[in-house]
Amino acid sequence: MTRHIRHAALFCALLLVALLVNAARVQVLHAKDYETNPANRRATITRYQQPRGDIWVDGRPVTGSRDTGEHLRYERTYSDGPLYAPVTGFASQEYGTTLLEATEDAVLSGAAPVLQPLPLWNEFTRSRSAGGDVLTTIDPRAQRAAYEGLRGRKGAVAAVEPSTGRILALVSVPSYDPEPLSGNGRTAREAWARLNADPDRPMLNRAVQRTYPPGSTFKVVTAAAALDAGVVKGVDEPTRSPDPYLLPGTTTRLVNGTDGCRNATLRDAFVRSCNTVFAQLGVATGVERLRRTAESVGFNDADLRVPFPVAPSTFDTTVDAAQLALSSIGQYNTRATPLQMAMVAAAVATGGQVREPYLVERTTRASGGTVSAAGSGAVRRAMLPATASRLRELMRGVVEDGTGGKAAIEGAVVGGKTGTAQHGLGNSGMPYAWFISWAQREDELEPKVAVAVVVEDGEGSRREISGGSTAAPVARAVMEAVLEPG
């Protein structure tokens, strides 16, 4: 009997050893395989077992969480969803996250190690920290003014604070409500299919994810390069420019949309937006000096984050003289996001300096303690201070005496530049209407806001579409909202 008991005990011991070996094999050798197996829903269930942290605008949350009582318990909710979708993006149990919901997901979901009370605390307790909050730089009055200013037309607005780089408004129209995408059921799938089938692409953030030919607004960059290089000695000297201008090495004649451009001064050419003058200036300045100025204000930067990625604005450096002439007036391969063109206006407003734009002021724990805060952004010199001063003068002339009159604000100093960009095969598309600007109160020392507006589908015939009539009123509304006291 004793012998049988010993054999049974030995057999049980062997079984226990086998179980331990198998457990070790599973937990050590195959842990990653089980963790990443699509059938393993534990991580997903854990992720949605608690409310998500919120994204804030000017002291109030524009997001929230709803308890569904299901396995994936909490779904995302949004206040003024279409208004803030170009900032928040969406957080979906089915389709993942975008924009701030994506780049700040670790903080918002509570997974960021910095949220743990002690190092490795969550790994030891098998818990997740409460989701933190993200406080944005958005000015709600400027955001709403931009959204309502577009009045349902397709386009985008970006506004920044020139002295800091804080993004004050980021609007893309048409927009969408992110909330129906939050769950994982039929409602989310139907919303996803509808939004992706929409030819107007409402989920595309046109302010930072789409580039456009900037048209005549790029003449600010061309003028800066020409002034810095000494190609133009003063804004009131004749430029010796013909009208029309024969593109170098071709038989193509470049013409203007207005009279008075032959041998015009830089001041008159800027106000009249003379294509011939700026095309010739671009060729005389040269591709290398134009590239240097364009890149100093942010063109050809594939690494810009705000914190989500921004589509790179491009200035082609592999051009011949004729192509350079067209590039100098914001055509050919020159492309820019609205955020990029707001940075161009900001560079003029701040005396030639450019600060990196940013959207997140700080992130906090659920208790309110600061996790991270935005420091002073990187600064680079885009143009000489004297050049920036001359361009401020020229941009003021556009608003006070030229095509940008609809951007004028009583009691404020406003500078701007209009633009109408051709596109499509043989320039067959409806022209894009641009306006870039900056503004300051008359009793203040520096501009408070720089804005870029692009409208894709301006009202009226092709000849009636212009930055001055279509985009400038939108910019004015945004600037007024920022300059308004209180």
Image: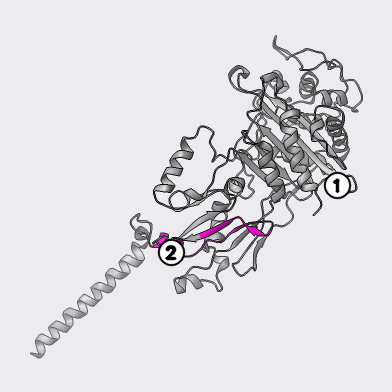
Q: Splitting the image into 4 quarters, where does residue 338 fall?
A: top right
User: Quick one: 69 or 390, which is closer to the camera?
Assistant: 69
**Picture coordinates of residue 290, whole percent (x, y):** 75, 30
Name which residue lies at 77% across and 17% down.
256
The answer, for residue 95, to whether it is visible in the render is: yes
Upstream in sequence: badge 1 or badge 2: 2
Q: Secondary structure at mark 1?
A: loop
Q: Is residue 32 left or right of residue 97?
A: left
User: Quick one: 12 or 335, which is closer to the camera?
Assistant: 335
**Picture coordinates of residue 408, whole percent (x, y):** 83, 36
**Picture coordinates of residue 342, whole percent (x, y):** 73, 40
Query: What amino acid is at disc 1?
Result: Glu
Residue range (magenta): 42-65
- In this picture the colour scheme is one colour
Name which residue lies at 48% across and 65% down.
50
Q: Quadrant of the N terminus?
A: bottom left
